[in-house]
Amino acid sequence: MQLEQLLQNHFGYTSFRPGQKEVIEQLMNGRDTIALLPTGMGKSLCYQLPAYIFKKPVLIISPLLSLMQDQVDRMKQYGEKRVVALNSFLNREQKQRVLQFLPQYRFIFSSPEMLMQEQVKSRLNQMELALIVVDEAHCISQWGFDFRPDYLKIGGLIKDRRPPILALTATATEKVLEDIRHVLKMDDPYEYIHSVDRPNIRYGKKIFHAKEEKMEWLIEHVLHTEGPGIIYTRSRKRTDDITTQLLNHGLSVSSYHGGKDAVDRQFIQQQFLDGSLEWIVATNAFGMGVHKENVRQIIHDSIPSNIADYMQEVGRAGRDGKDAVAILLYGDGDEDVAHYIAGEDLPNENQIELYVEYVRRQVNPKEMVHDGLISETSFRVLHYWMEHYSMDEVKSIFRQMMNDKYRSVEEMLNIVKSNQCIREQLVHYFGQTLNSKPEHCCEHCGLEYQHFLLPRITKDTKRNSTTWQTRLRQILLGTD
């Protein structure tokens, strides 16, 4: 049966989007594949259709709990029952039951950390998989080496009868692509590289010399322009501060960051998806895998740590193909905060030496965490590298990582301070060529915001911006 017929039978579409058919054909031929498809181009179909063709389970490795839960929920809404998320939301009994019946699922979502557990690895090695999918595969390079080292172990996950691997991402430089090939141990992969440019997104930029000016502009702008929108910040405190200011002006808005309870974050995300919230103010903990079609604005309250993160976050906008605007705010000294945040999880040389000392004294180095000498995240990174290299080699590796992070901040800063076309600079960073520009391309190409941002219509915000606990109480007590 032709792929187009299978596509219509299973998904109701009559034709493929660019790249989808090419990727699926390569997977059907058993070839490892890398697909760089911008946000909104239908990456998930590249593994969903093969699952129905091969009639074997597909393993999808996903970086975030919220991302995999969103994907599972969406599949269930469309009638797919044989889907499961193997993650920390499962209690012990639920996890054992899922593992027992794992071969009966069509789609299995999991995090890299969960897959490294011995009982999970053992179960997967007993199964025959159709595909291994690494979703948001840029995380291998951006997170694996210095934040979540279990990403670096994925390539050795399946010992025998390894199925084709599909690596999916929306943004990747040649260095990131090389990291993906190497870490996943890909065998001469087919690569479909689509342009990272999103012509429907216009790039704005505002420069301030005082923090107060930035906050004043932000409030004024959000009060008078239509959302939905996401405001990205660099810290939890800044996230909460901006949210409080906007709430005081009657906006339906909520903050979102890693310091909130997981269930609360899920509730806030759902409020944003169903339109109860006009705006989300968030750290980079929010966005990946959030499938909201009509986000009209992305505002960065400060410069991100690198261009790749910026493009990922900007990619939340305009998934419906309609016009959207991304505005980057810069204040003097923002790069200092970006430098600090970029390197805060990297162990320092003193911590490396302490690790060696704990080992010499025959003390479990994990006691460093209990002794308050290192964070859990930093220890996880340090422990991985110390298992593979000497102390001096690890020091050198981390120095290089820190230099790379500082250089990435400077690359982002150069775009902010340059008077050249923002779109051209972003596309060139990924080693691609921009063949054409949309009208009103960016701040330096005559961007007129009124052409793309509608005036805000005041809404009743009485019921919005509550916690999930408060809303549940209202419903149960009948005070809604």
Image (tube, grey):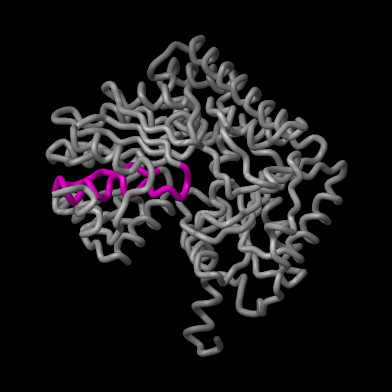
Residue, x 55% and y 44% (percent of image)? 198
Q: Position of residue 283 (x, y in %)?
A: 61, 48
Foreground pick, 254 / 441: 441
Q: Position of residue 162 (x, y in %)?
A: 18, 31
Q: Is residue 97 left or right of residue 474?
A: left
Number of marks present in the image shown: 0
Where, by quadrant of the figure, is residue 155 drawn?
A: top left
Relative vertical location of residue 266 with respect to residue 461 in this rendering, above or below: above
The reply to whether the magenta stretch includes residue 43 is yes
- Location of residue 28 (image quadrant): top left
Residue at image position (50%, 58%) is: 320
* Residue shown at the point (71%, 69%) measured from the top left: 456
Q: Nearer the viewer, residue 99 or 354?
A: 99
Is 217 positioned to the left or the right of 163 in the image? Answer: right
* 74 lies left or right of 211: left
Q: Is residue 92 magenta?
A: no
Indicate whether 132 appears above or below 214: above
Is 221 positioned to the left or the right of 281 in the image?
Answer: right
158 lies above or below 15: above
Counting from the top left corner in percent of width and height, residue 336 is at 74, 32
- For this orientation, the residue located farthest to the bottom is 478
* Residue 127 location (% of width, % of height): 13, 41
Q: Which residues are magenta?
A: 38-62
Relative to the observer, which residue lies in front, 187 or 447? Answer: 447
Q: Image height check: is 38 above or below 306?
A: below
Q: Quadrant of the C terminus?
A: bottom right
Q: Is residue 283 visible?
A: yes
Does residue 96 show up? no
